[in-house]
Amino acid sequence: MKKVSAKQLLAIAVSCLALAGCGGGGSGTTQPVAPGGSGNSGTQQPGGLGGSGNGGTPTQPTPSVMSFSTYLYSDTTDVNVPVITVYIDGKPVTLLADTGASGLIVNQSAVNIPNSDVNSSYTFTATFGDGSSVTGIMASATVCVNPSITNSCIVMPIGLITSGSNNDFQKIGTQGDFGLDSGINSMDIGFNSFGSSIFGYSYATYLAQQYGINSYTLSFYPLSNTFYANVSATTPIGQITFGMYNGNSSTLIPYSTDFLAGLPDTTGVFASSTSSYTDSVFFDTGSNFNFLSTSVLQTEIPNFSQTASEGACANYGWPNGIVNGSFVLSYTLQNYNQNYSTTFTTEPSLSFCQNNPIPNLIIGTTIDNGSGVFGLEDFGLPEMLRHTFTWVLNGGLVEYINITP
């Protein structure tokens, strides 16, 4: 997940003039609709999203749209880092599978982009929630999840990383970030010296435009030790499937762009027997912990104290601020028809930390993040591993999510 600068907000505002759905989710009986017809918008943004470009007539994708899947894996050098192999101009590259950001950025050294497809006069800067940042230049490339499947390949803008401070894409086994948020919180918004911009949307946004695909589902396999596992780099931890949403519309949770936060989110309620707290929530596989605000923890944990309720495992390699194990936390997401509620238990316990090295996958790990991530509650991979998530798009941008169980 990344921060959005004032300059990027201006580019986002301009891009929203050409994108259906930027104004937020519908109300009442609004249902997901198919992407609009094709348009003629050049290379800087996808044409035909909700009738953009030359105003193409919206068309309904046919039921024969082919779905396709690919595996998700775990990075083995850190905890809770999901990765995906993506082919960029034919070269396989390992990227962070990140539902907390949009767009695609990759180390320039990891790919072979012809000079004719590099827009070096357009530069971008992406700053992430942990304060690290990368800079680079824009390019155009053919991006495939599976090169043998034609409708998994699209030509799209990407960001080529040329430098960075505290660049995680050099410290861990990934070469960049595959943004799966399908919002307007893009990592690769390139500007030139005249103020013109190239806006890189998510891979799925371009799939919606070109092939009529309107959803994708992330599902995770059960962990071998119930709440944790150590898996090899070649063992799948789940899969992502792109296709058409055919589920129950009454279970969809509104999940559209929050312009104050700069990313898609939804409303969550955190309650105890004596009080409740409401805040915006987003789901972010790019975060390797749940980053919750102190307000949530104070609401849900009886007699919560940062001294007594946190940090028991900090002396065993875990970060400061990690919430102690065995607290049961709950949240409810508001829906038009029926609310979605679930609970989880914080991990790890002190005894686990004392007797086990840090695994590369673990459920329930939660950090007290003060005021939250940019003022929001960030459920990272430790919570998402327990569920199956479907992103449902409207005009190429996410409008709803579905969560099971």
Image (cartoon, rainbow, N blue to C red):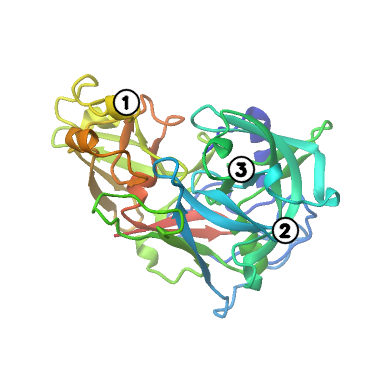
Which residue in the structure is indicated by mark 1?
A: 321
Q: Earlier in the sequence, mark 2 or mark 1?
A: 2
Q: Earlier in the sequence, mark 3 or mark 2?
A: 2
Q: Amino acid at mark 1?
A: Gly
**Circle 2/circle 1 CB separation < 8 Å:** no
Foreground of the two, 159 or 283: 159
Q: CA distance from mark 1 to mark 3?
A: 29 Å
Q: Which mark is residue 89?
A: 2
Q: Which mark is residue 380?
A: none
Tell me, yes or no, if residue 36 can be seen here. Answer: no
Q: Amino acid at mark 3?
A: Ser
Q: Amino acid at mark 2?
A: Asp
296 left or right of 78?
left
Q: Residue at x 46, y 47 (%)?
A: 75
Q: Of helix, strand and loop, which one carries label 2?
A: loop
Q: Which mark is residue 186?
A: 3
Does residue 150 sit above or below 262 in this rendering?
below
User: Could you say where residue 71 lies in the image, as x and y percent from the top left?
Assistant: 48, 62
Q: Residue at x 40, y 57 (%)?
A: 237
User: Could you say where residue 168 lies in the image, as x and y percent from the top left?
Assistant: 54, 35
Q: Earlier in the sequence, mark 1 or mark 3?
A: 3
User: Could you say where residue 255 lies in the image, as x and y percent from the top left?
Assistant: 45, 50
Find the residue positioned furthest to the bottom.
Answer: 64
228 left or right of 47?
left
User: Could you say where residue 227 lies in the image, as x and y percent from the top left?
Assistant: 25, 49
124 left or right of 116?
left
